[in-house]
Image: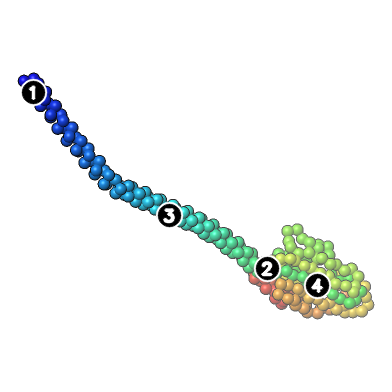
Amino acid sequence: MLKRRSREISIFNLSMLDVFASAMAAFLIIMIILLPYYERDAIADQSRIAELQQALDATQAELASAEAAREAAEAETQSARAEAERQRQQAESLVSRLARTFLVLYIRWNTLDDIDLHVIDPSGAEFYFEHKTRPGRPGELSEDTINGPGNEVWEVRDAPPGRYQIFAQLYKDKDARKPAVVQGRVFHRDGSNAFPTVRLNRTSESALITTIQVDADGNVMLR
């Protein structure tokens, strides 16, 4: 009885080996058949991954280029704003300068007399040979002639608005020819104007030549 059972077990084991061998053979056949398809799918996936990577790289490059362009545009905008502000300030400065005027006043005479120019500015400060300049006030008597024929000059670079009174005085009589004829002119931003002629006959005689009015826009008028 024992020998017969062993034979049955051996037969059973052989049968199982056959089954396993058959299964393994089937598996190998299936793998051999399907392997090319797996390989093709793997290659396709790798190609697709490479394409996606290239697309990603291109997108990142485009983003970097766009960011650089944005930064350049922002810098250009800031530069344009700075230039606009500079031009605005320059325009304001020019407007301010155009609203000012200079004054150059001069008188002349053809006798030997000593004749003095006197200028009273809008503040009431008086300029003449003893006070050619005044502290805190613009303007200067830049030329003073003692012996005629001669001329005298008063000038101011930026004339404050207001009224300027212009006088001529015969300080010292040195010539028998009388009257001493005094003429003159004012030069300013917009041109020049001749003074009315005045005549002086004796020592210490003074005459108002003209009144100059400067307005807030730098316009000059004689009155």
Earlier-in-chain disc, 2 versus 1: 1
Numbered tag placed on residue 103 in the rendering: none
* Cα separation between marks 1 and 4: 155 Å
Q: Circle 4 is placed at which residue position?
A: 106
In percent of width and height, residue 207 lies at 80, 75
* Cα separation between marks 3 and 4: 79 Å
The residue type indicated by label 1 comes to Arg
Query: Furthest-left residue in view?
Result: 1
Q: Circle 1 is placed at which residue position?
A: 4
| The quarter of the displayed image where residue 167 is located | bottom right
Q: Secondary structure at mark 3?
A: helix
- At 43% from the left and 54% from the top, the residue drawn is 59
Q: Are marks 1 and 4 in contact (CB under 8 Å)?
A: no
Q: Secondary structure at mark 4?
A: strand
Task: Name the quarter where the C terminus is drawn.
Answer: bottom right
In this picture, residue 157 sits left or right of residue 61: right
Q: Is residue 9 above or below residue 30?
A: above
* Cα separation between marks 3 and 1: 78 Å
- Residue neighbourhood size for the residue with mark 2, other residues' Cα within 10 Å, grouped as few (<14), some (14–19), many (≥20): many
Q: Circle 2 is placed at which residue position?
A: 100
Q: Are marks 4 and 2 in contact (CB under 8 Å)?
A: no
Earlier-in-chain disc, 2 versus 3: 3
Looking at the image, which is closer to me, 41 or 116? 41
The residue type indicated by label 3 comes to Thr
- At 89% from the left and 68% from the top, the residue drawn is 146
* Cα separation between marks 2 and 1: 137 Å
